[in-house]
Image (cartoon, coloured by chain):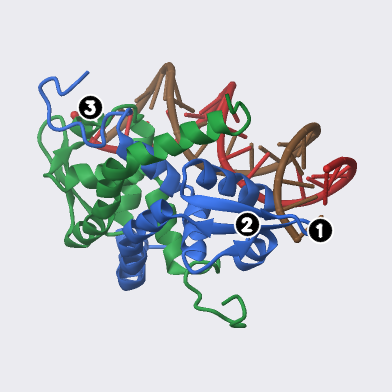
Chain colours: A green, B blue, C red, D brown
Amino acid sequence: MGASAHLSPDVFAADCPTRRVLDRIGDKWAVLILILLARGTTRFNELRRLIDGISQKMLSQTLKSLERDGLVSRRVIPTVPVAVEYAITPLGRTLHDAVDPLRIWAETHIAAVEAAQKRYDGGGQASA
Amino acid sequence: MGASAHLSPDVFAADCPTRRVLDRIGDKWAVLILILLARGTTRFNELRRLIDGISQKMLSQTLKSLERDGLVSRRVIPTVPVAVEYAITPLGRTLHDAVDPLRIWAETHIAAVEAAQKRYDGGGQASA
DNA sequence: CGGCATCCTCGTGGATACTG
DNA sequence: CAGTATCCACGAGGATGCCG
C-alpha cells in the first residue's frame, strides 16, 4: 500500500464522509445524548439532569445539531410552561447501533488501556 | 453518586469508561491514524503525507497518546537518518474493529444525514 | 420550562524554528 | 527523518442574564 497512487478515499481526505461522522461522534455530548434518547423520549431539563456536567448551552446546541442531522426529533408540547420532548429517530437509532460496539469495547478493554498507560508512564524512564 | 435512584450509570457519569473512550474517539486524528495503521505498518512522514491536513504536532502528539494507550506500537530503526515505524497492536486492532461499524454507517447514511440537513436548513425557514 | 444572546476564559491546535 | 519546544490565534464552551 501507500503505493496505490490513489488509495481508497476512506478517511484520509478531508472531504470524506467518515470524517464528518467522526467529527459528530467526536462531540462527546452528542453520543451521550444519543445513547440516552435511545432509551426513551426525554425532556430538555431531564436530559440536563441526567447528563452529568453538561451545560445548558451545550445541551441545547448539541440537540439542535442532532435534530439538524435527522438523528433526533423535537416535539413541542404547548402546555402553559412550554414542554419539549426529544426522541431518537430511526436514523438516529441506526447510528446508535453503530456506536454501541464502541461502548462495549470501552467497557471491555478500558482496563487494558489503563494498564498500558501505567506501563507507559512508569516504564518509560523510571524503570524501577 | 453510585446509582442512587436512577438508571444505569453507563455514560452519564463523568467517571464512566465509555466517556474516556469517547474522548479518545473524539480525537478524530486518532481514529484516522488507527484505521490507517490497521492496513499496515507505516512510517512517521508517510503517515503525515497520507493524512490530509494533519500537522506534525498533532501527528506526533496523537501517536504518542495511542502508544500510551497501548493501541499503537513504535519501533525505532537506528539507521543513519533515524527511521520510525508505527504499527497497530492487537488491542488497537480490537478498537479498530469496534470503530469500523461507525465507518460503515458513515458511508451508508451520510446521504440521509445531508438530506436531513438540507431539509432543516431550507425547510425550517424557506424565506431566505 | 425551554432556550437564545453575551461575555470571557482557556485549551486546542496550527505555524515556525531548532535538535538528534 | 523524526521529533520537541515556543509562540500565538481562534473558537469551543462555561457562566450569567433575559425572554417565550
Q: Amino acid at mark 1?
A: Pro
Judge depth for marks 3 and 2 and give the one in front: 2
A103 or A92: nearer the eye? Answer: A103
A57 or B71: nearer the eye? Answer: B71
Label 3 crowding class (10 Å Cα cut-off): few <14, some 14-19, many 20+? Answer: few
What chain is tagged by disc 3? A
Q: Which residue is mark 3?
A: A49
- Seen at 41% across and 55% down, the residue is B90
Q: CA distance from mark 2 to mark 1?
A: 23 Å
Residue B3 point in image, percent of width and height: 15, 24
Callout 2 secondary element: loop
Residue A12 point in image, percent of width and height: 54, 67
Q: Which residue is mark 1?
A: B81
Residue B20 point in image, percent of width and height: 38, 37
Mark 1 and mark 2 in contact (Cβ < 8 Å)? Answer: no
Q: Amino acid at mark 3?
A: Arg
Residue B124 point in image, percent of width and height: 31, 58
The answer, for residue A63, to whether it is visible in the render is: no
- Seen at 35% across and 50% down, the residue is A65
Q: Which residue is mark 2?
A: B54
What chain is tagged by disc 2? B
Q: Are marks 3 and 2 on the same chain?
A: no
Q: Taking D19 as reference, is A96 above or below it?
A: below
Quadrant of res B85: bottom right
Judge depth for marks 2 and 1 and give the one in front: 1
Q: Are marks 3 and 1 on the same chain?
A: no
Mark 1 and mark 3 in contact (Cβ < 8 Å)? Answer: no
Q: CA distance from mark 3 to mark 1?
A: 56 Å
Callout 3 secondary element: helix
The answer, for residue A122, to whether it is visible in the render is: yes
Quadrant of res B18: top left
A30 or B8: nearer the eye? Answer: B8
